[in-house]
Amino acid sequence: MFKIAVISANGGIGRTTLTAHLASLLAKRSQSVLALDFDPNNLLSLHFGLPSTELDGLALRAVRGQLWQDAAFSNADGITFLPFGAPNENERLNFGRQISADPHWLSDQINKINLPAAAIALIDTPRLPSIYAQQAINAADLVLAVVAADASSYAKLSPLREVLKQSGKANDTFYVVNYADAARRLHNDIVTLMQHELGDRLLPYFVHHDEAVPESLAANSSLADYAPHGQATHDLQGLAGWLLTRIALKT
């Protein structure tokens, strides 16, 4: 299974939303897809029509010593979704200690999932620094770092790159700008700075700001179904195509 960690150093820049819509687009291209929520906030579950509280899932079952494979769901697009789960506070702390003791815990667990060898796992994470995001980075064959064209994302770019370098994943990491708005001068200036710093590690598939994205969530629909000809859908189709090409080169 090809594992993709979707990470960011900032909150509120659409990392989880991007993960969900990429999973949908890849599934619509007849790929076997696992969407794995490795964020205690359980926000990815909202994109699959599930409640974020009292949720069964990987972490909840792992800390209770139960089989966790049965906690997965399948949706109408054929995506296998594995929630993080909603452990209580003591269980969450115990789980944190468990994965802190084994940097490759998540990778080992994903390898136990009964999916085709050619399946693609998209792992949603909390913003860095986080033991959960670090587990996903350690497990990943490719790291997709989500950034915004704003001062906060640019300020955290160097520390983020250092984390990835220390993890041995710098050469497996690519960056994507989300919520792009070329009409804003500041956006263009910061993108230019990022291009100078990242070179071809910054993907040309910017995902533009599009009201269809929050509207599709409110309608409990995938973006591709809600706005098949929308700007963000077009952008994400380009990103999905690039991912498939990259995966083919690495497998």
Image (cartoon, rainbow, N blue to C red):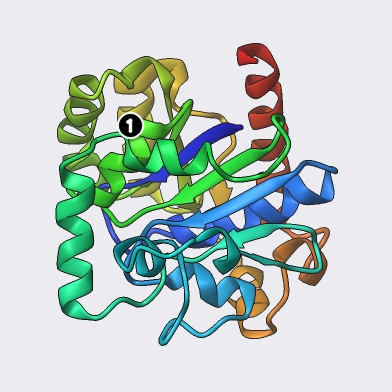
Placement of 37 over or under 185, stated as above or below = below
Q: Position of residue 34 (x, y in %)?
A: 62, 50
Q: Camera-side residue: 86 or 147?
A: 86
- The quadrant in which the C terminus is found is top right
Question: Residue visible at 38% across and 36% down?
Answer: 191
Question: Residue visible at 69% across and 37% down?
Answer: 119
Q: Camera-side residue: 25 or 78?
A: 78
Question: Residue visible at 41% across and 72% down?
Answer: 85
Q: Position of residue 142 (x, y in %)?
A: 48, 28
Q: In which quarter of the image is residue 239?
A: top right
Q: In which quarter of the image is residue 66?
A: bottom left
Q: How many labels does the image show?
A: 1
Q: Is residue 186 left or right of residue 246?
A: left
Circle 1: element type: helix
Which residue is denoted by mark 1 in the rendering? Answer: 138
Q: Camera-side residue: 81 or 230?
A: 81
Q: In this view, does 142 lie to the left or right of 247?
A: left
Question: Residue visible at 41% across and 36% down?
Answer: 107
Q: Where is residue 151 in the image (x, y as percent from the top left)?
A: 22, 48
- The quadrant in which the N terminus is found is top right
Placement of 82 over or under 220, stated as above or below = above
Placement of 6 over or under 127, stated as above or below = above
Residue type pointed to by label 1: Asn
Whether residue 145 is visible, yes or no, is no
Whether residue 194 is visible, yes or no, is yes
